[in-house]
Image (cartoon, grey):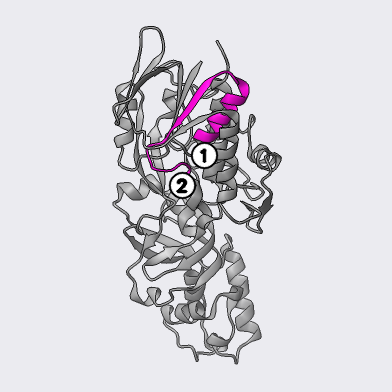
Amino acid sequence: MTIAIIGGGAAGYFAAIEAKRNCPSADITIFEKAPKMLAKVEITGGGRCNLTNSFRLISDVKHAYPRGHKLMKRLFKRFDHRSAYEWFEREGVGLTTQEDECVFPQSQDSHSIIDCLMGLATRLGVKQKTRHCLDSIARNDDGTLHLCFANGMERDFDRVAITTGGSPKGEGLKMHAMLGHEIEQPVPSLFTFNIKDRNFLELMGTVVEPVIASIPGTKMRAEGPLLITHWGMSGPAALKLSSHAARHLNERQYQSPVAINWTGESRRSVAEEEIGGIAACNPQKQLATVRPFNIPTRLWHYIIHRTGHSLEHRWGELGKKSINRIIETLTNDIYQIEGRGKARDEFVTCGGVSLASVDLHTLESKVCKGLFFAGEVLDVDAITGGFNLQAAWTMGHVVGKELGIRN
């Protein structure tokens, strides 16, 4: 049996390794269009490779996977984050879980993961070819799949797995559409927000943890640290919100209000109690000297001015309207998103081959037997925190199992 894996990324390597283990006699080749394999794995997590998450803070899979959560919940029954953790440790890669529940190799170096995958594939006899860009796929009368590459190479395979990752501009999805697959329009996900409020941008470098960021008028929200940059908002809270709101913001050309709850508390009553208590216990103290919710000093001073007060104003001098204005700003501070931040190295694409076009148990194409999909090429993507790589491991493992089953 001959098997082609198109895409030398996380899902591709997992699919190839699992297929070879299930069917040792199979001739398996990974084809990658770039000059080197696993390039995206190398840069993820700032080069440290945030390969999965403990999921301890995830009460529902849909909170981690804005698109594809039902599929992931199904596939996790076959290979989940615990399975991935055990898989890498079994292969000799020690792992560690951080306080934020993100999992990294103990070496804090992505090459530990890369060396593991490439070394294992080589030992198993998986062929690995770079600079091979797939141009087209056609189904032969005998059921095999005919692949044509940009370098002129043509070859038939019994089975093919597409693990090419996201296609931000959609070019890589055209051949799949021509075969009859439904395509969900790709748009960016996991991006930062441009904010043009000069006073706000003067807070650059300030980190506030945690905050709740949301899109007013929707149920889209995200919690976590927020980093104020020289262009606007970054950090996990902004990136997670951009994931949930990827299509919403794209439709509005990245022009939208965003609300920040600086307290990190979802109940307004908590802020009312905190501010009321401070005012009652510190009537002679200046506003600047008592910071609610341990908010960074620079941000608290900014909020004081934003509510129309001076730093020297005393707590006891605040009337009911002034206190309500402070509470409202702390819990529902509105800014205007005016564009998304420049593309990050670890970009993620929302969209791809529609899940309606694949068998949700095997990830085999419904319109082209013997063709499988795994990873970000499908309309599945996640928030930041190791969840996207976990999806790659899970789908790659499932597809590898299916590829290695003889009819």
N-terminal-most mark, 2 or 1? 1
Quadrant where the C terminus sits is top right
Residue 40: give its label: 2
Q: Secondary structure at mark 1?
A: helix
Residue at the spot of label 1: 10
Q: Position of residue 402 (x, y in %)?
A: 56, 21
Q: Position of residue 297 (x, y in %)?
A: 53, 81
The image shows a total of numbered marks equal to 2
* Residue at position x 64%, y 46% in the image: 55
Question: For the residue marked with disc 2, what is the amino acid?
Answer: Lys
Q: Nearer the viewer, residue 106 or 377?
A: 106
* Residue at position x 69%, y 49% in the image: 94
Say if 110 sits above or below 24 in the image.
below
* Residue at position x 58%, y 25% in the image: 20
Q: What is the distance, in whole Å, between disc 2 and disc 1 at their CAs? A: 8 Å
Q: Secondary structure at mark 2?
A: helix
Segment tinted magenta in the rendering: 12-38
| Left or right: 81 as drawn, with respect to 144 | right
Can residue 316 be seen at all in this image of the molecule?
A: yes
Question: For the residue marked with disc 1, what is the amino acid?
Answer: Ala
Can residue 63 be seen at all in this image of the molecule?
A: no
Say if 367 sits above or below 398 in the image.
above
Say if 168 sits above or below 385 in the image.
above
Task: Estimate how packed mark 2 is, as few (under 14), some (14 to 19) or many (20 or more) residues with alpha carbons within 10 Å.
Answer: some
Q: Nearer the viewer, residue 310 or 96?
A: 96
Evaluate if marks 2 and 1 touch, with contact meaning CB atoms under 8 Å apart.
yes
| Left or right: 55 as drawn, with respect to 350 | right
